[in-house]
Image: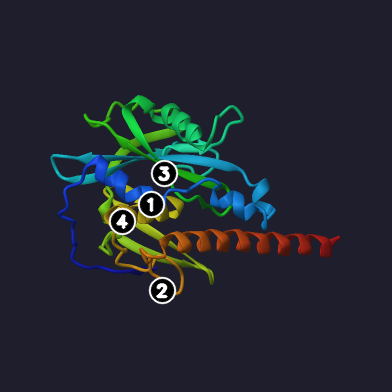
Amino acid sequence: MRSMSSSPCWSNEVFTNELVRKRLIPYLDKTPSYVDELSQSVPRLKRSRRASVLIPLYCNQVTNRIEVLLIKRSDKMRSHTGMVAFPGGMADPTDRDRIHTAEREAEEEIGLEPSKYSLVGCLLPITDSRIVVITPVVALLDSPKFVDFRLSPDEASDAFYVDLEQFLLASQNYKMLEVGDHFVTHHFNVDKYHIWGVTSYQLILLATLVYQRAPEFPVFRHEQYLDLKQIKQQQMDFFRLCVDYRNRTEKKERSKEKSRL
């Protein structure tokens, strides 16, 4: 594991919901979605499960900081137990669309009702090691700040806000871990919380888009940095890399099973 440090360089812009919305609109996932298009050439994606997460942002007018609302998953969850995540979960057959999945899950998990925020839209999908297709849905919280958390004991043990800009900084709280030949994971220790995995990756992407500057550290393997001019293509290329890697792994596993028969 490698750690990096530098002096924090905080933004002095005045942030409002309107500015954040304007920054994010060019990066929304347009219809048809990237995954739908990719599924035409990668049949594996058609069988992949779908999930959505809500990313609630709060523009604090007192501190002029952008805060993002996260949860800690309950120890009762079957997967990713105790991990920090966005409110969200698997799509239900009764959900109207990807956005409805995120809205429903956020209300079930922490009591965040749609009346408390305005939607910006869906960012490009991300995926995990199981190739679950995850749609990030960005929402802008209204004032006053939502703190009336009604936690579902089976799904969330905590809900809290963190500063978004810190996910651009190579501070003492940040470490990178190389995983195999193709991937890295990003780890942030924020107060008592350890934020990593898909959640930290999405926070890095979101902070890059909102603050319109690249992180101080490489985001991909082999020292590859984010480039604002190429960020959508970089995201799509990484998504494809994850899917292709999982496909190759599954084929190898099937071949081993056949050879043992």
Label 3, secondary structure: give it: strand
Q: Residue at x 22, y 68 (%)?
A: 6
For residue 106, side relative to residue 259 (left or right): left
Q: Residue furthest bottom?
A: 222
Disc 2 and disc 1: Cα gap in Å? 26 Å
Identify which residue, 150 or 242, lies in the foreground. Answer: 242
Q: Residue at x 34, y 33 (%)?
A: 118
Give the mark, 1 or 4, whose residue is nearer the N terminus.
1
- What's the mark number on residue 26? 1
For residue 253, side relative to residue 210 (left or right): right
* Residue 219 percent location from the top left of the image: 40, 65
Is residue 30 in view from this perspective? Answer: yes
Q: Tell us which disc is closer to us: 3 or 2.
A: 2
Q: Which residue is mark 3?
A: 85
At label 4, the amino acid type is Phe
Displayed quadrant of residue 151: top left
At label 2, the amino acid type is Glu
Characterize the local packing of mark 3: few (<14), some (14-19) or many (20 or more) Cα atoms within 10 angstroms: many
Disc 1 and disc 4: Cα gap in Å? 21 Å
Q: Which residue is mark 2?
A: 223
Q: Tell us which disc is closer to us: 3 or 4.
A: 4
Q: Which residue is mark 4?
A: 167
Characterize the local packing of mark 1: few (<14), some (14-19) or many (20 or more) Cα atoms within 10 angstroms: few
Q: Tell us which disc is closer to us: 1 or 4.
A: 1
Give the mark, 3 or 1, whose residue is nearer the N terminus.
1
* Residue 145 percent location from the top left of the image: 24, 32
Q: Residue at x 55, y 30 (%)?
A: 96
At label 1, the amino acid type is Pro
Disc 3 and disc 2: Cα gap in Å? 26 Å
At label 3, the amino acid type is Ala
